[in-house]
Image (cartoon, rainbow, N blue to C red):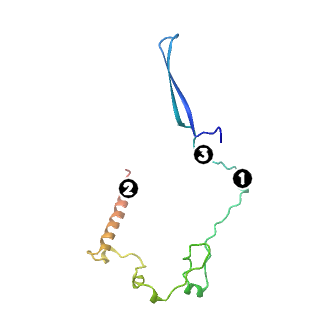
Amino acid sequence: MSGYSLFRTVTLTKCITANTTAALCRSNVLCRVPACGYAKKVVMGKSKSKSMVKVELKGPEVCTDPQKLTTHAVGVNIFKQGEDPKLKPHEEYPEWLFQLNLGPAKKLRELEPDSWEYWQRLRKENIWRNNRLQQGKKW
């Protein structure tokens, strides 16, 4: 890597001429001026693009075995090796797990005004409203 440098030393010379015979020159040496630029974009010709093989991305394998779908949490294992965890009986899970709202979010008029969820939803709807109003403005 000798001969390659990220920075280049630059010498600036400023000359003031009063007449044609005499000149006053002053030199300043600036160090560490960036000499590297951006990488060049690769331009692919027509011949290269035709010869390249396009690789299609494959999604995860879909399990269709009904017995495994009812006894295991399919798709929960994030590691390359190992199995999906087995489902436990309902008694081993906490009560609050089965009381979670898995459907669409409740509307503002369905919530009680004294609850934390009401004020969270009110704030979120005001943000959505302000975002819609700002879309038409240029600045």
34 relative to 99, above or below: above
Give SS at disc 1: helix
Asked if residue 68 lies left or right of residue 97, the reply is: right
- Residue shown at the point (60%, 79%) measured from the top left: 83
**Residue 59 position within the rendered picture, expressed as x and y whole percent measured from the top left:** 61, 71
Inspect the image, locate mark 3, and give the three-letter code of the amino acid beneath it: Ala
Tell me the number on the disc at residue 48: 1
Name the front one of labels 3 and 1.
Answer: 3
Label 3: how many residues lie within 10 Å, few (<14), some (14-19) or many (20+)?
few
Give SS at disc 3: loop
Give SS at disc 2: loop
- Residue shown at the point (54%, 28%) measured from the top left: 11
Counting the numbered discs, the total is: 3
The outermost residue toward the left is 114
Nearest the viewer among 102 and 108 is: 102
Where, by quadrant of the figure, is residue 128 drawn? bottom left
Inspect the image, locate mark 2, and give the three-letter code of the amino acid beneath it: Gly
Query: What is the distance, in whole Å, between disc 3 and disc 1 at their CAs?
Result: 20 Å
Inspect the image, locate mark 1, and give the three-letter code of the amino acid beneath it: Lys
Q: Which residue is mark 3?
A: 39
Q: Which residue is mark 2?
A: 136
**Residue 33 position within the rendered picture, expressed as x and y whole percent measured from the top left:** 53, 36
83 relative to 5, above or below: below
Where, by quadrant of the figure, is residue 121 drawn? bottom left
Name the front one of labels 1 and 2.
Answer: 1
Label 1: how many residues lie within 10 Å, few (<14), some (14-19) or many (20+)?
few
**Residue 61 position within the rendered picture, expressed as x and y whole percent measured from the top left:** 62, 75
Earlier sequence position, callout 1 versus callout 2: 1
